[in-house]
Image: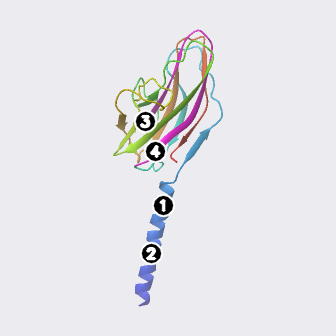
């Protein structure tokens, strides 16, 4: 009787530990970046301004991911600026539109602060959202085209990259801050 009781206790403890590990793995997160990056200047090439590592277990298979606010500051009236977001398993930012999950319209040739709001969801091994190449700062309002999606492995090390492309090497652009959450 004592052996059976001890065996039941061990089984219950193992189940408790497994449940606790699952809760930790699928815990809501709210990442805030409030320190501005350095200005990107003297180039018109796509330049990484921020890389956020997201380890395995960060995401649930049905998470809704939100960037409730991203601020980008552009100084200069010589050219335009575009901001891109990429989600990748590569520890190096992919080039071009590889792993793109959003791109902003081109900011005009003037001093500006861009406010960006984006929402994505994870479904059946993919990350989905409004057209990743759609020219919209936010997901508000009607948008033409279908939902964009790309493969997304929640069990892999992922990186969120934020980059800027200046239209003139004489302008300056930086990421002022942003927030990423699944709650």
Q: Check disc 4 and report the residue beneath it.
A: 64
Q: Check disc 3 and report the residue beneath it.
A: 88
Q: Secondary structure at mark 3?
A: strand
Q: Check disc 2 and report the residue beneath it.
A: 12
In front: mark 2 or mark 4?
4
Tell which circle, 4 or 1, labels the residue nearer the N-terminal end: 1
Q: Decide which of 56, 121 is in the foreground and name it.
A: 121
Q: Residue furthest front?
A: 142
Tell which circle, 2 or 4, labels the residue nearer the N-terminal end: 2
Q: Quick one: quadrant of the N terminus?
A: bottom left
Q: Is residue 137 magenta?
A: no
Crowd band around label 2 with a 10 angstrom C-alpha radius: few (<14), some (14–19), many (20+):
few
Magenta part, dominant SS: strand
Q: Is residue 151 left or right of residue 43?
A: left
Is the residue 155 above or below the residue 147 in the image?
A: below
Taking the spot 58% from the left edge, 43% from the top edge, the residue there is: 31
């Amino acid at each position: 009787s004592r052996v059976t009781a001890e065996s039941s206790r061990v089984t219950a403890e193992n189940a408790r530990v497994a449940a606790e590990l699952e809760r930790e793995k699928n815990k809501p997160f709210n990442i805030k970046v409030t320190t501005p990056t350095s200005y990107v200047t003297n180039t018109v090439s796509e330049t990484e301004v921020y890389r956020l590592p997201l380890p395995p277990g960060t995401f649930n298979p049905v998470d809704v991911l939100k960037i409730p606010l991203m601020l980008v500051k552009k100084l200069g009236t010589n050219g335009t600026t575009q901001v891109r977001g990429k989600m990748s398993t590569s520890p190096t930012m992919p080039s071009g539109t590889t792993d793109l999950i959003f791109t902003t319209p081109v900011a005009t040739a003037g001093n500006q602060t861009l406010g960006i709001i984006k929402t994505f969801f994870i479904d059946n091994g993919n990350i989905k959202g409004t057209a990743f190449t759609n020219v919209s700062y936010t997901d508000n309002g009607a948008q033409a085209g279908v939902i964009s999606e790309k493969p997304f492995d929640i069990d892999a090390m992922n990186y969120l990259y934020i980059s800027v492309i200046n239209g003139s090497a004489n302008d300056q652009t930086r990421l002022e801050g942003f927030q990423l959450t699944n709650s």
